[in-house]
């Protein structure tokens, strides 16, 4: 009898261990966002990322002073900043996507932005307050949708960002290309600095990446980086990623992963 009880106990223990290990295994669907793990980890945990933000905004302050001194324009002056991954850190949303396996959807994104709880990116608030102290206004040009106006303003105001009001915020209505919105600001203000994590935050000419990933366009404007254009690091997502997909839409996660790998440069592609 004792032996039987012992056997049942051992079996129960093994079963328990199996059950525990099974619960620790992520559902298969989680794998589809695994590619985001490293970039989100770097964005959240690498002090190098933090330092890059400080470096960018320190340089922005320096260039703002220089650009103000060089300005011969009578218009009031402004800096234009993107919002997501430029002044607000949405990496908790990416971390949530990795952990749950839920891919981006507008509904999921709004669940996050409705909380109005994003933190400021390192150095962004100091830079915009510095600009304000120099009499320079801030305009926020973002591809958040206009339906997110109230929660976005709430988030920016809570963090103390200057000019967090409807007059200074141009969200997306019909197109993600920001030219029309930048031109609207230019009608009344001289834009001294533009800051963003996507190269399209600076000028529409960077949107075309069909030829060699758009590298030649960047090379042709190399003198503008750090001077008029302040670029921030975002390895988690961006229009840069679509180049690997060769313009194809509706790809499933496996196809996307294959194309990402295909776009990498190895020894062979470099002729070694
Ligand atoms: Mg952005």
Image: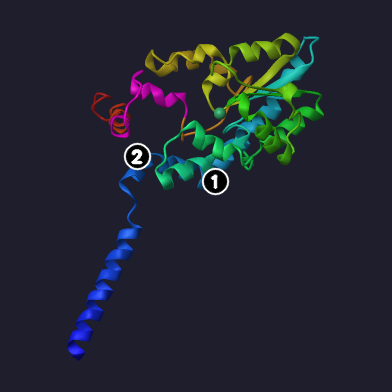
Q: Position of residue 132 (x, y in %)?
A: 78, 28
- Foreground tag (2 vs 1): 2
The image quadrant where one finds the N terminus is bottom left
Q: Is residue 148 left or right of residue 271?
A: right
| Chain-order first, disc 2 or disc 1 | 2
Query: How far across and down, in percent of the image, does residue 75 sit?
Result: 79, 11
Residue at 71% across, 40% down? 159
Quadrant for residue 246, please give it. Answer: top left
Point 24% across, 23% down: residue: 271
Using the numbered discs, state the Cα–Cα distance from disc 2 to disc 1 in whole angstroms: 27 Å
- At a point 62% along the width and 27% down the height, the residue shown is 147
Quarter of the picture for ligand 1?
A: top right
| 250 drawn magenta | yes
Q: Residue at x 68, y 12 (%)?
A: 184
Asked if one can make out residue 249 in the rendered structure from this viewpoint, the answer is yes
Q: Is residue 6 left or right of residue 104?
A: left
Residue bearing the label numbered 1: 47
Q: Which residue is mark 2?
A: 32
Q: Residue furthest bottom?
A: 2
Using residue 136 as the reference point, say whether residue 94 is left or right of it: left
Secondary structure of the residue carrying tag 1 is helix
Colour scheme in use: rainbow
- Pick the quarter of the image with the C terminus: top left
Q: Secondary structure at mark 2?
A: helix
Asked if ligand 1 lies within 8 A of label 1, the reply is no
Q: Is residue 82 visible?
A: no
Badges 2 and 1: C-beta atoms under 8 Å apart? no
Range covered by the magenta-colored residues: 238-256
């Amino acid at each position: 009898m004792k032996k039987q009880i012992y056997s049942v106990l051992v079996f129960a223990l093994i079963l328990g261990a199996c059950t525990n290990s099974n619960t620790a295994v992520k559902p298969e669907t989680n794998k589809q966002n695994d590619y985001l793990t490293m970039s989100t980890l770097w964005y959240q945990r690498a002090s190098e990322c933090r330092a890059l933000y400080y470096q960018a905004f320190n340089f922005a302050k320096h260039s703002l002073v220089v650009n103000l001194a060089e300005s011969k324009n009578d218009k009031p002056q402004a800096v234009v900043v993107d919002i997501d991954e430029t002044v607000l850190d949405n990496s908790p949303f990416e971390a949530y996507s990795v952990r749950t396996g839920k891919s981006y959807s507008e509904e999921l994104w709004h669940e996050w932005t409705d909380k109005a709880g994003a933190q400021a990116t390192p150095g962004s608030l100091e830079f915009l307050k510095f600009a304000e102290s120099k009499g320079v206004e801030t305009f926020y040009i973002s591809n958040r949708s206009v339906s997110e106006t109230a929660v976005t303003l709430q988030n920016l105001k809570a963090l103390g960002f200057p000019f967090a009001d409807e007059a200074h915020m141009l969200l997306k209505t019909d197109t993600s290309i920001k030219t029309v919105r930048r031109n609207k600001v230019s009608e009344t203000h001289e834009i001294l600095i533009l800051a963003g994590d996507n190269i399209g935050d600076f000028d529409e000419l960077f949107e075309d990446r069909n030829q060699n990933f758009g590298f030649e366009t960047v090379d042709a404007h190399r003198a503008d980086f750090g001077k008029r254009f302040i670029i921030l690091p975002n390895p988690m997502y961006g229009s840069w990623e679509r180049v690997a997909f060769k313009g194809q839409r509706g790809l499933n996660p496996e196809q996307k992963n294959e194309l990402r790998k295909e776009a990498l440069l190895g020894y062979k592609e470099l002729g070694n």
